[in-house]
Image: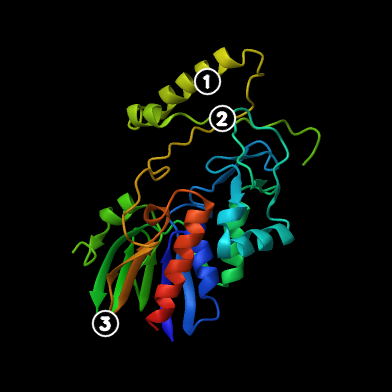
Amino acid sequence: MARVLVVGAGLTGGACAALLRGAALGRIAVWDKARGAGGRMSTSRSARDAACTADLGAQYITLETERAGPRRSFYDELLSHGILKPLTAPVEGMVVKEGSCNYMAPQGISSVVKYYLKQSGADVFYEQLVTCISLRDGKWEVSRKMGPPEQFDIVILTIPVPQILQLQGDIVNKSPEIGPSVVVHTTVTFGSEHLDSDPAEVQQLILSHLERIVPSLPKPASIKCQKWRYSQVTKAVPNCLGQMILHTQPLLICGGDGFTHSNFDGCIDSALSLAEAVKSHL
């Protein structure tokens, strides 16, 4: 039985692990460098009250019914389990296309990823930063910042492409007392200009601008400034169909929205492509 490692506990990694459950594989492991699941579908909880949450990355997902195809079953499953619900609140400036439906996650957008990880039955480990992937006796030896290296027959990389390129080794070769949450997203230009600036200074810039827009907004009880070094994909890797095989024997494969497009459907497409490629190598 092949031992499989999925690197990245985001949407692509979680969905891919779930799709591989039941294949002729051994136990699947999922490693992520963060303290919890979600990746760029991240939900943060207030330090003062865990029931007060804010979705920091994706905040809703959109189903385009005419283009759904086999992805429709993913939406139906999440809706049937209460993970997703129709988005009924108005969103200022949002253009709703005819035939499309928007959905939100009442337990936080990271609950979508957590659902797939649970369905996968995988062993999920957090705070596991992968640093090096090397060939050892016909297997992949995967090293991490904390803990001893481990060997796997198949490694699936679902982390952002810039993080893949940094790897070393042979690869180189609800209560009424709870107040509302406010999430402020900056533009790509602003993010690029202030990428390496002091987070405290950037936070003050954002707060000052918010106060000018909404002067009546009450003072926040708590603030979290989230820097996304790897955000939405603007130009995907061409002609990859959702994944790229880096090595065949043993299998090393990578995927994610960097190989499709940066939304829910793109991650699901990549997960489907990854699972199909892995099964074909068994």
Q: Position of residue 166 (x, y in %)?
A: 27, 53
Rendered image quadrant of residue 221: top right
Side of 17 relative to 66 (left or right): left
Identified at 60% across, 29% down, the residue is 222
- The label on residue 223 is 2
Side of 107 relative to 276 (left or right): right
Q: Earlier in the sequence, mark 3 or mark 1?
A: 3
Query: Dot 3 corresponds to which residue?
Result: 138
Query: Dot 1 corresponds to which residue?
Result: 207
Number of labelled discs? 3
Q: Position of residue 177 (x, y in %)?
A: 79, 32
Instruction: Quadrant for the C terminus, please.
Output: bottom left
Identified at 51% across, 57% down, the residue is 11
Q: Secondary structure at mark 3?
A: loop
Q: Secondary structure at mark 1?
A: helix
Q: Earlier in the sequence, mark 1 or mark 2?
A: 1
Residue 257 vertical position relative to residue 116 in the rendered view, above or below: above
Q: CA distance from mark 3 to mark 1?
A: 53 Å
